[in-house]
Amino acid sequence: MPSSRKSSSRRRSGDFFAVILLLAILTGFGWLWWQQKYPAKKNTPKPKTAIAIPANAAKPAKLKPGLPAIVRQDISGATNAPQSVSNAVVFVPQSEFPRSVRDVLEAQVALARLTFSPGSIDAAMGSQTRAAIAAFQRSQKLPETGQLDTNTRPHLTLQMPVMTHYVVTTNDLGRLQPLGKTWLAKAQQSALDYETVLELVAEKAHSHPLLIRKLNPDVNWTNVMAGTVLTLPSVNYPKPAEKAAFVVIHLSQRFLEAFDDNTNLLAHFPCSIAAKVEKRPVGELHVVVVAPNPNYTVNPELFPESTELQALGHKLILKPGPNNPVGVAWIGLDRPGYGMHGTPVPEQVGRTESHGCFRLANWDAEYMVKLVWVGMPVAVVP
């Protein structure tokens, strides 16, 4: 009996160790299977995405997503037509703004945002840009040089990126229509709206069409589709805090300025003046009517050079629109036939001459409507 009990005890002990060994083997195989199926993640850094930045562009210290802007070639040396402009998109850190302007294009955008219009934004240091800089310097009590000098740059700052993206919509395309070639054809149109997408977006951006082309070199402007993404200067006038107290029009320098009651400068805009000296009124006039999006009455007596109108022998009424002869706004003065108004060709403001009125870019005329009031004095000086 004792021998039988010992033998039974040995068997139980052997079975126990066998079970332990089997569990160890199964655990080992299980661990190997788990490592193959779910390998441990290595803590390796992710490769950085390369971002193309022109060699002469300022490189941001730290990039943050969600802040698209345009890094452009420095075109501050432009004199006439806009020079080459890169449309490489990068992400600009919020910490870059506010900052001082770096070139002429940035200065034009910064000035326009402050309602010191340099005319159609074109990246060129022309007479209208110099006049806008001088007006800004005057408002800041800086030496009035008309140049982007070391005294001016720290005061002329950007609060956000110079460029923005604009998506062409079906509404944009739906409003386009060819402009009639004759006065009678224009009178028969339902509206005198934009003819092309290029014209439309150039006015939205207060810009010269040539600059818009430079910023968007791959766009087929003869067939722009809805959904096309365009790069444009980002310019919006602020909402006026108050009405102007008076306006001064400078004939020799071809610009007008609006002031408040304390003679603080509220706006500076280029303007065209009459071709004939005798049609340039000097002295004090007053606003008698303010009409946004007006009709326009074509009077043959005011266009003796038009053989078509002389043959018709009667007045025509043209519908509103940016291609209306007075653009998108009419501010009539107390001298019959005279007023401040918009124009179908804003890039020619200050460079061409009128029959007597003071022509403004459509965006400037539209802003003036918000500043003026019936009875407001307008001083015209030589």
Image (cartoon, rainbow, N blue to C red):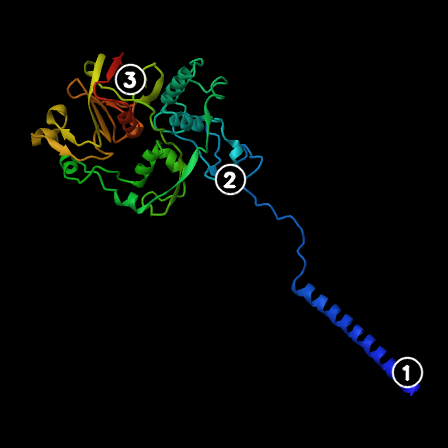
Q: Secondary structure at mark 3?
A: loop
Q: Nearer the viewer, residue 366 or 212?
A: 366
Instruction: Between label 2 and label 3, give the one nearer the viewer.
Output: 3
Q: Tell me the quarter of the image containing the N terminus.
A: bottom right
Q: Earlier in the sequence, mark 3 or mark 1?
A: 1
Cα–Cα span, label 2 and label 3: 43 Å
Q: Secondary structure at mark 2?
A: strand
Judging by the rendered image, the residue that carries numbered circle 2 is 91
Cα–Cα span, label 1 and label 2: 83 Å
Q: Say which mark, if any, is on residue 213.
A: none
Residue at figure coordinates x 31%, y 29% from the top left:
347
- Mark 3 is on which residue type? Ala
Residue at figure coordinates x 34%, y 28% from the top left:
239
- Mark 1 is on which residue type? Lys
Tell me residue 46's x, y (percent): 62, 48
Residue at figure coordinates x 26%, y 45% from the top left:
174
- Mark 2 is on which residue type? Phe
Judging by the rendered image, the residue that carries numbered circle 1 is 6
Judging by the rendered image, the residue that carries numbered circle 3 is 245
Q: Secondary structure at mark 1?
A: helix
Residue at figure coordinates x 58%, y 35% from the top left:
61
The residue sitting at the right extreme is 2
Quarter of the rendering containing residue 162: top left
Instruction: Between label 1 and label 2, give the one nearer the viewer.
Output: 1
Quarter of the rendering containing residue 204: top left
- Residue 57, above or below 285: below
Q: Earlier in the sequence, mark 2 or mark 3?
A: 2
- Residue 81, above or below 248: below
Tell me residue 263's x, y (percent): 34, 14
